[in-house]
Every structure is written in C-alpha cells, then in structure tokens.
Amino acid sequence: MRIDKLHLQDFGQFHNKDITLAPGINILYGPNEAGKSTIKDFIVDMLFGIDKSRGIGARFDHYEKRKPINGSAYSGAMEITTKEGQYQIQRNFSRQEKDTTVRDLNTGRQVDLIEPNNLMGTVLKTEKSTYMNTLCIGQMGAATDKEIADRLNHYIVNMASSKTGEIDAVSAVTELKNKKKEFSNKELELRQQELTKSLDLERDFDAELAGIQEQYKKLEAAADGEENKSIQFTPIKNRVDTDEKRMEEKPKEEDEKEPLTKRERDIKMLSNMGNKSILDNVFVTLFVALLGVAAFVGIAYVIPGNVPQVKLAVMGTGIAFVMLTTILYFVRRAQLYKLLEEIEIEKGFEEAKTKTAGADQRAILNQMSDLKVKEQQIVNERTEQENVMKELNKVREEIASNEVETAALNLAIQTIQDLSEAIYDSFGSVLNEQVSKIISKITQNKYSEVKIDDQLRVMVKNGSSYISMDYLSAGTVEQIYLALRLSIANVLVEEELPIIIDDIFVNYDYQRLKETLSCLHEYMNRQIIIFTANPGIQDMFTGLGITSNYLSI
C-alpha cells in the first residue's frame, strides 16, 4: 500500500490541509508543536478509525485530543494505491455522524465494506495492533526504557504465538493461570475432611431400626395379650349379675343334663331377691316371728274345749315351729351372707387382677412409646448422615470437576506455550538473520549477530559469547529495537504498508543516524514517511545518494 494524498478537512489544529506524498522516502519537516504527530495520527486514524472511550477517561482520550480546534466537522480523506487499484477513503470521525466510505478512483464506484467503518477485508489486511507495534514508530516508540522494552518483548511473544498482535497469547496464558485459581480445591478438600470425620461408617442404621421394630412387635403382642386378659377378667360390677348372666346364657340342653348346683341356685336366688330384700332387715324377721308365735297362741285360745293340755300342745308346737323356722332362717341367712362375702372377696381379687393387668399394659405401652421415640431418633440420625453423604458426594463431584477444569486449563496453557515455541521456530531463524543483518550494518559490524532465544530474550553476540542488551548503550538498544520492529514487519506483515517514523532520531549522534538512514534504504519496497524536527535529514539522505521527497509543514 502507498499513501498518495492526505486531506485534513478538520482534524486537530489543521483545517483544509492537503499533503501529497511520494512512493519512496518522504520527509515531513517541522519544528516542535508544528503538528507532525497530528498528521501521523491522522494517517493511522484514516486507516483504522477512532474509538471513543467511555467514562471519566473519555475526556482525555485520543478522540478528544484530535478533535478540531475550531470545532468544525471532524473529518478528512486519503488517497491510496494498492495492488488492486487506487482508492479514496473518506471518514467522518464525529461520534454523532460517524461514517466511512471507500471509492474506487478508476471506476468511481463506492466499495462495499464488510463491516461498517472498518477497512479490514477490503483495502486492508493488517490489524491496528500489529501495525502500531512494527511499522508505525512514534516518539519514544523505540525508546530504551525497560517498560518499553518489556512491552515490545511481550508483543514479540504474542506475534510468535499467534502471528497477530491482536491475539495476546501472553495475556491469555496469564488469564488462564488466574482462571485456575477459581478451580482451586483447597477449601473443598478441607470441607471433604470435615464431612468425612462426621460420618459414622461403622453404624448400621437399618439393623438398628430392624431391632427396634422387632422389639416393638414383641411388646405389641404382649400388649394384646394383656388386653385379652383384662377382657377375661370380670368387670367391676356385681359378681352375682355376672354369674347369673352366665347361667342364663347356658343352653337349655345343658340345664337339663347338668342341673344347677346349690351354690348356683343360691346365687340365682340372691340375684332375684335384689339388694333391698326385706329379709336383709333383722327386725322385720323377728317381727314376723313374733307374729307367728302370736298366731299360734291365738289359735290355742280359740280351739274349742277346755283342755289345757291340747291348747298348750298347740301353743308349744306352734312356738317351737316358729322358733325353729326362725333359727333355720337365720342359719340360711348366715349362709347366704357368707356366700355374698365370698363373692365380694372374689370380686376384689379379680379387680386387683384387672388393675395389675392394666398396670402391666401401661408399662408395655410406655415401652412401646419409648421405642417409637428411639426409632424416630435413629431415623433422624440416619437422615442427617444421608445429608452429610449427599453433601460429601457433591463436594467430591466439585473436586473432580475442578480437576477436569484445571487439567483442561493446564493443557490450554501448555498448548499455547508449545505453539509459541513451534511458531517461533518456524520464523525465528529468518527473524534473527534479518535483525543481525541490520544491526551489523548500523553498528559497522561491531555487533554482527543477534539472537532471540526460546524465551524471546534479545541477545547480542559480542566476541565469542552472547550478552544481554542490559550491557549495551542506550543508542545501540534503540537501534536493535528499531531493527527488530522492521524485521518482524518483514516476516509477519504480508502487505507493504508504509513505514512511519515520528521524530525518533533526536538522541542519535551523526554516525548512528547516518547508518540508520542508510539501513532504511533497504526497505525501499515500502513507502517511508519520516516526521522530524532535524532539517539535516534530507541532506544526509542526499549525501547517501538516496532520493527523498521533502515537505515542510
């Protein structure tokens, strides 16, 4: 690519400024603050555009720095020549009216851009980062400051890794290493140890629950037995009624075959008499007896005749009968009361048995309740252990997953590093050869060979050994980095983009400047644009027999 014309419509301090460039070496001379760096930025911005920053930093970014001083339209145009033809590029940099058009100067037709405001893929193939780190050398761009040297070395690693400055392989490796920290298993392993300690692996909860259930079944059977016993016991009520009911429920056939015993008849009689029988009252019984005696005495008196012996006999017999009957009644009454006492004793015994049976049943029920509580406790403990095991399994899965992620990240890091070495090996020898050739010429064969080792450190051969650039003078280091930039561009930049040098020769002595300018003649296949405040640059080119296009800003 060759830049033919620049038209700074409104850009920085320039308004309606035209600059015509030649195919070879162009020298744009101007004192400090004349606008040399502004024109250099215009060329870069016309090729790659300007991105407006956001936030607080936007007030001091490149967009604001190069805004037109007079506040007019923020725009310009540039004519270029490529292998495909001649084109005019027009850009409006204003954020509100941002626009880019490309027109084919041979046909007059507008060229469709693959992406709005982006020349990549149409008239441009090289990324901005690659161009800015190789062919576009601004003030301090080839400085000896360690930070600048590290930045360039960092860029070389990226180029070796991906052959493009846009893909930052070094940062990618750093990012991958930082990413590995997210998958650290340190805390998970500590948690795994805690959970493992809380597990009781020797305890068989199922066996314990089975034992509890077996005991419960036994107690349940015992409780059913005690309940049956209590049902067999006579309820707390009159035993007479119970026995009477039992006798009444006997089938008639059994009554005919087995007549009631005397005891059973007495019980039946007492049942029929009820609790308020008149016989229960002794005074009533004696009163009836006296009535009987009186009756016999009355009978004796009313017997006809006057035979005292007969009357006495009737009276005596009657009294004896009443007395005997009364005595027999009291004997019988005593027997019945004794029977009642026996029944009461039996009733009390059976009630005691019922109470004992009830107490035993309550004890069994209490034991069953305790077993239920113990069973629930075991179930809760088993659930807790199961939850611990679930969490432990989850932790183990996370550890395993992290190990997989870590292994993948390690593989990615190793792959990038291996590719860096492999790609570096593919062009490292060519790069070393070109840098050595340039340095040898610039330093008049003082340093004839430069090596960039497998760690991408720049080493210079001094005698029979290689030394680090830390031991070289500032001017020599500047020359080496300039040669390195140009050599990387020759190896990696396919299209012949212009070399832009913005006032980097300020600290060069005469001999070093002369050798450097002579070296630039080797790159006449590319357009060279030199911005300088040194008016002797053109004379030096003339003295070297090199034609240049001199322009005063």
Image (cartoon, rainbow, N blue to C red):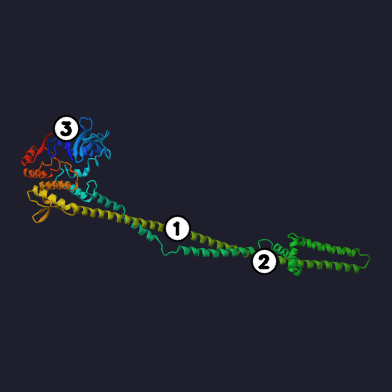
Q: Is residue 452 above or below residue 213?
A: above
Q: Amino acid at mark 3?
A: Asp
Q: Position of residue 410 (x, y in %)?
A: 28, 55
Task: Write down the residue under mark 3.
Answer: 18
Label 1: element kind: helix
Task: Write down the residue under mark 1.
Answer: 383
Outermost residue on the left side: it is 543
Mark closer to the observer (3, 1): 3
Q: Position of residue 508 (x, y in %)?
A: 9, 43
Query: Could you tell me how far apart the alpha carbons at marks 3 and 1 are, in whole angstroms?
Result: 85 Å
Query: Could you tell me how far apart the alpha carbons at marks 2 and 3 are, in whole angstroms?
Result: 138 Å
Quarter of the rendering occupied by the N terminus = top left
Mark closer to the observer (1, 2): 1
In this view of the protein, can residue 482 be seen by the observer? yes
Q: Around disc 2, counting alpha carbons within 10 Å, would you say few (fewer than 14), some (14 to 19), or many (20 or more)?
A: some
Query: Could you tell me how far apart the alpha carbons at marks 1 and 2 are, in whole angstroms?
Result: 55 Å
Q: Is residue 548 above or below residue 307?
A: above
Residue situated in front as seen by the camera: 153 or 111 = 111
Residue situated in front as seen by the camera: 450 or 422 = 422
